Image (cartoon, rainbow, N blue to C red):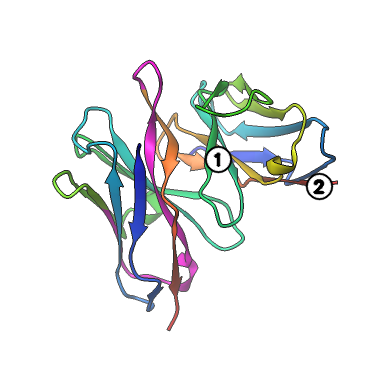
Amino acid sequence: EIVMTQSPATLSVSPGERATLSCRATQSVSSNLAWYQHKPGQAPRLLIYGASTRATGIPARFSGSGSGTEFTLTISSLQSEDFAVYYCQQYSDWPRTFGQGTKVDIK
Amino acid sequence: QITLKESGPTLVRPTQTLTLTCSISGFSLSTSGVGVGWIRQPPGKALEWLALIHWNDDKRYRPSLKSRLTITMDAFTNQVVLTMTNMDPVDTATYYCAHRLRDTSGWYHDAFHVWGQGTMVTVSS
């Protein structure tokens, strides 16, 4: 199966700063990659699909890039509501797989 | 508006079989392209993709759990059911069902854009 590796495990960022999260696949997933935001007690929220397309209602400060095996999620200016765990997920091959997550917390 | 809601037992004994039901509304399980998946999250751990069923009854499973999982759907009752046999304490998790994304062009992606609230299942004797 394709293993998704996210880095860093934890990212400490001040409100208003930029956050850059990475996701790497053990083999090419083309652009079949999604990013989710997950807060405690809530369902995950789809942010990005197709590696770079924002899902409906997602603010423009969230952007995704990359293809093949290397992907990045950028949050341009962190808001208080953005502190959460972020997961990448590939849907290029079976089984679909998630990364282990990056926790974005307050610096 | 698409909604999904999981239901099932909160406590399961080791070796028992878990049956979870995902009740859906706002879409039809028989519509071409539709798919519903199950994902779980053990406490303090990452999301784990378990299974997916498509409108045409095509089923996909996590290989490491395939022998224990069965996913079915009933388009008349608008339900997707996941069964997991031989439950173990390591299967303690919040279990989610979710709807695969249909983008604005009408294409489906195996990214999940609508999720249920999740149901916590504890495996303990």
Residue lying farthest left?
Answer: B76
**Label 1, label 2: how far apart the Cα atoms are:** 28 Å
Mark 1, other Cα within 10 Å: few <14 / some 14–19 / many ≥20: some
Chain of the residue displaying label 2: A
Chain where mark 1 sits = A
Task: Work out whether residue B112 or residue B46 is closer to the camera in this orientation and state it.
Answer: B112
Please give the residue where the numbered disc 1 appears in the rendered image.
A3
Q: Mark 1 and mark 2, same subunit? A: yes
Front-lying residue, A18 or A28? A18
Q: Which is more foreground, mark 1 or mark 2?
A: 2
Residue A18 is covered by the magenta coloring: no
Q: Quadrant of residue B83?
A: bottom left
Amino acid at the residue labelled 2: Ile
Q: Residue at x 53, y 45 (%)?
A: A44
Residue A29 horizontal/vertical position (percent): 51, 26
Q: Report the span colored magenta.
A: B81-107
Quarter holding residue A78: top right
Residue A92 appears at what percent x and percent y? Answer: 44, 29
Amino acid tagged 1 = Val
B56 to the left or right of B20:
left
Residue most extreme to the top: B105
Q: Position of residue A9 (x, y in %)?
A: 72, 46
